[in-house]
Image (spheres, rainbow, N blue to C red):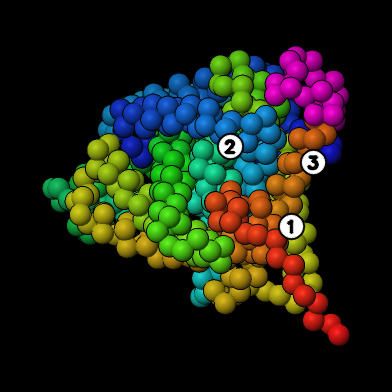
């Protein structure tokens, strides 16, 4: 299988943010998110400062802001929750556009939106500027257990393979005239999921045997030089 | 549905983070017993499978659709500890490479979706397996019930966490009723699909299903007389 570089969110580039060591970026993201979460919810000036800081990092990274903004849709379910908050929370009431809403709910909803969006944008920036392979090396430097990093490495490496397999199953189903519309079609989809599991599991067994035949002893060889990674 | 940053306050996030680290640590040791030196490639591929299956949409009707969480499915297919590891790695990858779920909420997400659903699904599954007759044909239904129970329970754990460290004062019982109700419905889907998927795998490769092994060893090789004559 081809090298596992590049994933859906990665935006190729050579900016200082792209080149920064991955473990520092993960630590920076964690620190940023912790500070954002711990900030009292009415400190709007501070949130503005965080947004500016994040904006500067994104600017330096040369990743187009629209590229990131488009991908903030992952937080959509919680936007719905945040919008509902003023109407379901209790406490003193206040008026917005002539509608009575809970004061605490309104503040909490806004804070949730602000904190959530800052967090998602910061995570997106990490994902857009870091190759999965660098991220794994970074996590290893952060003393994440070797075993966990290895599992993650295999997952990242075979994500597209397994995903592609699922995609081909979908094409095969649809080319036979199948389209899932309601729960009556669940058995077909569930059988696809079952077949996908068997294929993934058997692939895992083959990968393991192939590794054993190349001298695998349960530890990966130290990976400091990565030839061929600087591809186009 | 991954919890984003800022949904729970910092102390609660830190506490769930500590719980997640401890349980994943235990799972790392125990999974080696389930998989020995195959752990890394096998768990990695199963994690990729869980990630893919979460993208498989199941239409509910009227244009809406849902997808599996896959915790109970993982528990029955590869064993509870490997299951915890796989789903945790999926959540870690989603947080770091797909910006799905906040990094400060990673512990919370692991506690809810990797630990609660996997372990609850497994315990319910095992209890049913011990109580009911040991028949392979019952395994998919038992897995389905485990998956069904795991979803509203995970939602309840979320409500408890929200009561402890939530950022808005929603009455506890209102939130619990709403979350429990909605997730019971979601749990039905999760249960039915998990049961169907486990059934499909058992029909082809029953030896791959970790949860079916105690039932499988009791089978004997039967040589039937040929009916062709």
Q: What stretch is highlighted in magenta?
A: A212-232
Q: Is residue B34 above or below residue B174?
A: above
- Secondary structure, mark 3, is helix
Left or right, residue A33 beside residue A158: left
- Estimate the x, y position of residue A193 in percent, counting from the top left: 65, 59
* Residue positioned 34% across, 29% down in the render: B15
Q: Residue furthest bottom?
A: B229
Chain name for mark 3: A
Left or right, residue A66 beside residue B205: left
* Residue A167: numbered disc: 1
* Residue positioned 85% across, 20% down in the render: A227
- Estimate the x, y position of residue B119 in percent, counting from the top left: 43, 45
For label 1, count other residues whose C-alpha is less than 10 Å away and answer few (under 14), some (14-19) or many (20+): some
* Residue positioned 65% across, 17% down in the render: A20
Q: Do the residues labelled 2 and 3 touch (CB within 8 Å)?
A: no
Q: Which of B120 and B113 is in front in this view?
A: B120
* Sequence order check, earlier mark of 3 and 1: 1
Residue A41 visible in rendering: yes
User: In 3D space, how far apart are the residues under numbered discs 3 and 1 (Cα atoms)?
Assistant: 21 Å
* Residue B197: numbered disc: none
Q: Nearer the viewer, mark 1 or mark 2?
A: 2
- Secondary structure, mark 1, is helix
Q: Is residue A137 above or below residue A3?
A: above
Q: Are marks 1 and 2 on the same chain?
A: no
């Amino acid at each position: 299988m081809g090298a596992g570089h590049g994933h859906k969110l990665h935006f190729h580039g050579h900016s200082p943010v792209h080149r920064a060591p991955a473990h520092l970026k993960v630590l920076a993201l964690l620190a940023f998110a912790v500070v954002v979460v711990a900030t009292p919810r009415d400190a709007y000036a501070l949130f503005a400062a965080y947004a500016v800081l994040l904006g500067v990092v994104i600017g330096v990274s040369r990743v187009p802001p629209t590229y990131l903004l488009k991908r903030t849709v992952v937080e959509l379910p919680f936007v719905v929750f945040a919008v509902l908050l003023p109407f379901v929370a209790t406490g003193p009431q206040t008026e917005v556009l002539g509608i009575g809403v809970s004061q605490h709910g309104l503040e909490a909803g806004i804070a949730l939106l602000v904190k959530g969006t800052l967090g998602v944008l910061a995570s997106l920036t990490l994902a857009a500027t870091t190759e999965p392979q660098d991220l794994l090396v970074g996590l290893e430097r952060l003393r994440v257990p070797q075993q966990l990093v290895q599992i993650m490495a295999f997952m990242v490496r075979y994500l597209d393979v397994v995903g592609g397999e699922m995609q081909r199953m979908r094409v095969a189903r649809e080319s036979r005239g199948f389209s899932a519309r309601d729960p009556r079609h669940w058995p077909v989809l569930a059988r696809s999921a079952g077949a996908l599991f068997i294929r993934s599991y058997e692939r895992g067994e083959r990968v393991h045997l192939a590794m054993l035949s190349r001298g695998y002893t349960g530890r990966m060889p130290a990976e400091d030089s990565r030839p061929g990674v600087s591809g186009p | 549905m991954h919890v984003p940053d800022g949904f729970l306050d910092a102390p609660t996030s830190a506490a769930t983070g500590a719980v997640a680290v401890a349980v994943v640590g235990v799972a790392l040791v125990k999974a080696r017993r389930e998989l020995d030196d195959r752990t890394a490639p096998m768990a990695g591929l199963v994690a990729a499978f869980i990630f893919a299956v979460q993208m498989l949409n199941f239409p509910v009707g009227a244009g809406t659709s849902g997808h599996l969480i896959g915790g109970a499915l993982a528990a029955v297919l590869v064993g509870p500890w490997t299951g915890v590891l796989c789903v945790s790695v999926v959540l870690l990858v989603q947080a770091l490479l797909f910006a799905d779920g906040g990094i400060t909420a990673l512990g919370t997400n692991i506690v809810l979706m990797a630990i609660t659903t996997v372990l609850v699904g497994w315990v319910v599954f095992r209890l049913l397996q011990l109580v009911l007759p040991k028949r392979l044909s019952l395994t998919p239904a038992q897995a389905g019930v485990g998956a069904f129970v795991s979803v509203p329970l995970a939602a309840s754990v979320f409500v408890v966490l929200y009561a402890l460290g939530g950022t808005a004062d929603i009455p506890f019982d209102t939130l619990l009723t709403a979350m429990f109700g909605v997730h019971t419905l979601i749990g039905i889907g999760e249960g039915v699909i998990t049961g169907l998927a486990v059934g499909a795998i058992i029909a082809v490769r029953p030896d791959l299903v970790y949860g079916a092994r105690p039932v499988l060893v009791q089978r004997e090789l039967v040589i039937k007389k040929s009916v062709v004559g």
